[in-house]
Amino acid sequence: MPVVLFGLVVHPAPSFVMSRAIVTLLSLLALLSTAACKSEPGDRDAGDRDARDRHAGDRDAGDTRSGAAVDSTTIARDTPAAASDDFGIALPSDNRHASRVVSLNPTFTEIAFAIGAGSQLVGRTTWDNRPDAALAVTDVGAGIRPNVEAVLATRPTLVLLYATAENRAAAATFERAGIRTIALRTVTIGDFREAAAALGAALGQPANARTLVDSIDATLDRVRAAVDGAPRPRVVWPSWESPVLVVGNESFEAELLDIAGAENVFADRAESVAGVTIEEIARRDPDLVLAGPDRLARLQASAPWRAVRAVREGHVAVLDTTVFGRPGVAIGMAAVSIARVLHPGRADRLP
Amino acid sequence: MSKLVVAVGASLLLLSMLLALGIGAVPIATADVWNGLLGDGDAQVIAIVRDLRAPRVVLAALVGAGLAVSGAALQGTLRNPLAEPYLLGVSGGAAVGAVVALTLGLGTPTIVTLAAFGGAGVATLVVAMLARYAGGRAEPRILLMAGVVVGAFANAVILVALADAPPDRIRGALWWMMGSTADATWDAVLRTLIALVVLGGVLVVRARELDVLALGEEPAVALGADVDRAARRTFLVASWLAASTVAAVGLIGFVGLVVPNLARALGAHRHRNMLVVSALYGGALLVAADIAARAIRSPIELPLGAVTALVGVPFFLARLRKLA
Amino acid sequence: MTTTPSLPSLELHFDEVRVAYPRTSVHALDGVSLRALAGRVTAVVGPNGSGKSTLVRALLRRVPLAGGRIRVGRRALETFDAREFARHVAVVPQREEVQMPLPVREFVALGRHVHLGAFTPMGAHDRTTVGNALASAGMDHLADRRTDTLSGGEWQRVRIARALAQEAPVIVLDEPTTFLDIAHEMAVFELLDELAMEGRTVLLVSHQLNLVARFASHIVLLSAGHVAAAGSASEVMRGDVLERVYDWPLVVTRDPAVGAPALLPLRRSARAPRDDA
């Protein structure tokens, strides 16, 4: 922060300058690293998602080549759970550790309940609010940089963490305390499939997990079929206004767009969230702007955004933001919802 | 000599503004830029030029002028060529206001602007009161120390606010603190213009008093200046002028520090002259910095505060060497 | 000689003035009374730390009075605001740094600040006064030089010119000849003499006893915050008094060419005096 390190100094001016210069440069680096900010204001579900550092070695089929849109059909559906999690720790192949599970990520909590393992949960994060049954589980605080003591107080046998660098210390602490951990990312739909498979095995519901994934895949296939052949509009999906951030190519939103029959004008940006400028969006001239109702209202009222033709001419589409916070069990319905918005003429073919 | 300096400054300002209007992700020919300003031609071009580029260019000029004038007045009052508005609690207070608003999710531009200005205003008053409480007089040394104390306290509040804010709001808060004209609207331009004219006007009108204050405490008293009142008034007006720029574009440092020294190096010593020269060159400098912020890593936009810091640090080092 | 419009005559009174600096028990001024009358040069002398500069600071109200009063004419000092005071009393402080290099003429013109409002530009009368002030101080040939190019002596005299531009009937100077050589020192004292003859009240703080003896009509000798002696040069410049106050062996002589007592400090050490014949 530019004002940090101001502090008590004998000669305020020189060290103030040095500190500010250093901190400004650090802030610059932080800004330029990819960070996810996909929440609409008020939607605190996305609070757990943070900077994602992709370790290329951990990904195989999920890797996208920059410049190409994500094509989720290339991801093998029946891949058995990878042998290790996204921190490189071996995944449990059975449910011997699953008696008392703390889930530190909303997606994992959703999956646990969806596969019938909800009763095994003894802890969840503050933002895990789906399904309703999850609210009865003990709230242990944040999912990123978790309150380790609060988690340990529930005497867990297994902790499910979101795989971000900020959670490595917590993971190590749990391991040292003899508690098994599983750390997974949930950036793409492929991630979700792998997470479901891994959790199915680890929580003792492998069959239910397969069923969950299959039903989601079935829905996605139906959406793909429903919009097949329809012209694919070019869209931009802004996720933040100050700074201007849009959905990039390495994200489940990008995959949903592809499945629902659209082209992301920023498909060349191989990040989950891309920092751009309004003028760059204007230059790429998307046919349609997608966003939640509050954001759309602001964009249409904002003078600078009039530079984007789609905003100026009112080619905007409202998204139901409750299903788009994260790739959860409702991801099939999310695809349907986008497809309806993009291809109203094909509504009768959609589930 | 000074007429030449003023003329050159005005030309630089005008040229940089015209240049900035022509630069952006969408390539627009110069003639089309001009037509776009006038409202002729492609609707897209008009929207880009009038609603996107023009407000930010004008805002950059106004903010640069405001910060430079504020810095010049403070350097005169504090008799210290290294004084700048941010040393006296303005930036800390504004950042507290804006960051608290942003982390509470009240991130609409209007609220953030008001919160930033309110925070800066309060911080400035606290500094003035602290100085009065500590020494009873608006002495430069006491003002500076009070400013440092308020700044340190503001830091603590900001860190607390950021500590348990959701990551996306943290990013928005950081972005605000790094300074940018990307969110410029004509409303913001109007507000900043009013502040510059009114507050800057007060400073220019009272420029002779600044000359007298700059002589030193005893000589100033001997020449009939009410040193305490004058110093306090200048401090408040200059700080509020800086606060209005912070409210509009976030934290942009070094302009208030570097430009008045540049003005003095160009021979403008009497404050009436120096304030005008500072305004012109400050505006030109910030517009140029804005061009750099957009052009260096296009299409990614660098934060404006970072660009001015990159300019300011070498200048500062050079000055340190001269002093040593 | 320059002609100035006649100024009202105004006296400066210090009545039993007591000043203590914070966190010290000893008073810097402990009941000092003196009067500076119009038309003459009044000088305050004394060793270092006797309170000479504190008098000036008290006059400028940079230190509060612990007792006593200061009067300008019939009015108490507290009844003046800063501007009014500067129109009546012009003070040349002891030290001043060149913070802001300006052409000498503009620098001297700052003395008109007290007469000009925020919106009033300099008028003909202002410019004339500035010109006269420069001439009186003998600085008109340097009017277009920048202040940071002046020598120490020129700088001092330019500051005096600025005080003259204030057009105040009282002028107070704190050690105005510190960096001046013989010629410039004499020039300043002669200027002060002229100012007094024009009817101004001149109060001078100086450690130059011999020059003070020649030019001042009234001398006040301070010692550790008290008035040790006051009166004409003959009354004050006495060997016994001065030796006690300055704590140094000295002898007072009188040279007919000079017409005033002169002070000669003697050597304390036991070595025989050098004999340079």
Image (cartoon, coloured by chain):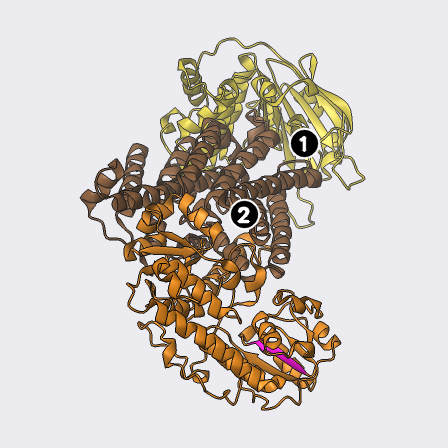
Chain colours: A orange, B brown, C yellow
Number of residues whose C-alpha sits closer than 10 Å to that of mark 2, classed few (under 14), some (14–19) or many (20 or more): many
Q: Which of the pair B42/A134 is nearer the observer?
A: A134
Q: Which dot, 2 or 1, sits closer to the camera?
A: 2
Q: Which residue is mark 2?
A: B91
Dominant SS of magenta comes to strand
Q: Looking at the picture, how far across and down is residue A46, in whole percent?
A: 54, 64
Residue B170: image x %, image y %? 54, 59
Which quadrant holds residue C143?
top left
Number of labels in the image equals 2
Q: Tell me the amino acid under the disc marked 2.
A: Ser
- The residue lying at 43 percent from left, 23 percent from top is C134
Q: Which residue is mark 1?
A: C52
Q: Position of residue C197 (x, y in %)?
A: 54, 13
Which chain's residue wears label 1? C
Q: Judge from the rendering whether residue C134 lies leftward or rightward of residue A308; answer left or right.
A: right
Q: Is residue C104 magenta?
A: no
Secondary structure beneath dot 1 equals helix
Q: In the picture, residue B2 is in which quadrant? A: top left
Residue A47 left/right relative to A254: right
- Give the magenta part as a residue range: A158-162
Q: Residue at x 68, y 20 (%)?
A: C77
Residue appearing at x 63%, y 61% in the figure: B164
**Is A188 above or below relative to C55?**
below
Which one is in front, B18 or C60?
Answer: B18
Q: In this view, which residue lies farthest toward the front? A: A348
- Distance between the alpha carbons at the discs numbered 2 and 1: 44 Å
